[in-house]
Image: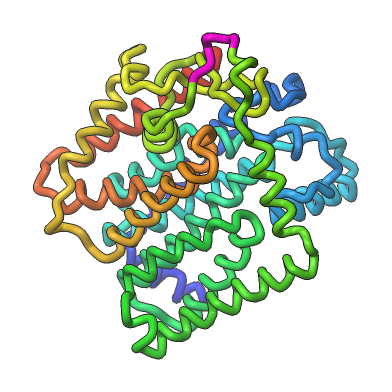
Amino acid sequence: MSKAEGQRRLESIGATPSMLAAAGISCVLVGLLYFFANIDLGERPNYSDYPFGADVPTYLLADGNIDLHWLTTKVLRAYRALLGVLGIEETALWAKAPYMLFGVTNLVLCMGVFAIATGRLSVRSLIYAITAGLALTIIHFSSLPESYALSTALYSAYILGLVYMAARGASAKLTLGMGFIFLLGLYNDISILFLTIAPAIMFGLRLVKEPSGRLFVLVHALALAAYLLHQIIRMDLLSHYMSFILEYTPVSEATRADDTRYDFDFIGAVMNFFFYSLCAPRAELTSAPWLSFPDYFGFFDPSPLSYFSGPAPVLFLACYLALFAFIRASRVTRLVLGLGAFVLLRFVLVLLFNPVEAILYASVAVLPLLFVLFHFLEVSAFRHKTALVAALAASMLVANGQFFFGGG
């Protein structure tokens, strides 16, 4: 891309030098937050040391040959090889670097999403993006070795493509780029397949009636076929997912002796997926659901009342619930409907697959969920949009900060 072309693209979204500087400073500050969160990795060697079901020791201690989330594994091996070439000893702090980078990349992508959606990179669109970057599950997985930071960045990149298509129209280059992102996503989280419900709703019959739509379908079909063929050759696709499902068989009644444990019900899944994924209700973990690992501990009490633990969680709950008041059927666009459908589909899949760890699978739904809510706020007649979303972001920063740095 030429310098002139780059300048024209920046001007097309109203990216002034001052706003670009603000965006850059925001990325640095949020990146530092990701770095210092979970700073004590080296002192926490066990799976039970990490909340929400994170498999940190798998990536922190393994030799890189783990057969789990293929793309993250390959990135991990390449990164370790690079450290070896540079003569740098791999420590827990060095292990954080790639995941922090994925988190910052996700933040940049969120900035692009909201800048295009609102028409320019403004103070409010920047706060929209920062709010997504301050979500509890985003901070958590951008601060420790796990697969979800990379998955989230890939989902966000794909959503950026959808938002660009909705605003500017489709092109062959964009379609090919999204197909490539889709392929990478499959290698890290096969459930990115369900994100395609968004373009299906966005474009409807145009996907088969128009040449650009047929190209979109063809590119995605080829990407999926290539992935499945590779997995069949490797002969581990079925065995991997079957072993994963069997791992989470319920524990017997005889082991239920600890009253801090609870049966994970629908309300628990809702609270973890739609609420705790964004903001911690308190600074400490209080409960553990029934898993196949009876000593596992690392969840919040799944109750709406859990947010009444301090000013910041209460402010979050008030601002977050206020956003739902702006939802109007007359303001729904195909893009919003598509992304909303994906969020609900993701939640249903979590309910069917592993409701116990709903918060674990919510990071990829943070951007589309907030995009839907912020869309209705943006098109409303409410006069204090920026103040409301700034209060939401501030409450999340304080509450999540208390969780990561105040004893969580």
Q: Position of residue 393 (x, y in %)?
A: 35, 33
Q: Position of residue 265 (x, y in %)?
A: 42, 29
Q: Nearer the viewer, residue 186 or 21?
A: 186
Q: Residue at x 47, y 32 (%)?
A: 136
Q: Position of residue 32 (x, y in %)?
A: 57, 33
Give yes or no for residue 368 being in the magenta stretch.
no
**Magenta-tinted stretch:** 257-262
Q: Residue at x 34, y 45 (%)?
A: 370
Does residue 395 appear to the left or right of 349 in the view shown?
left
Query: Against 218, is 255 above or below?
Result: above
Quarter of the image that includes the C terminus: top right
Does residue 112 appear to the left or right of 28 in the view shown?
left
| Residue 317 in which image quadrant | top left
Residue 10 in view, yes or no: no
Query: Against 362, is 392 above or below?
Result: above
State how the image is colored: rainbow
Does residue 335 appear to the left or right of 134 in the view shown?
left
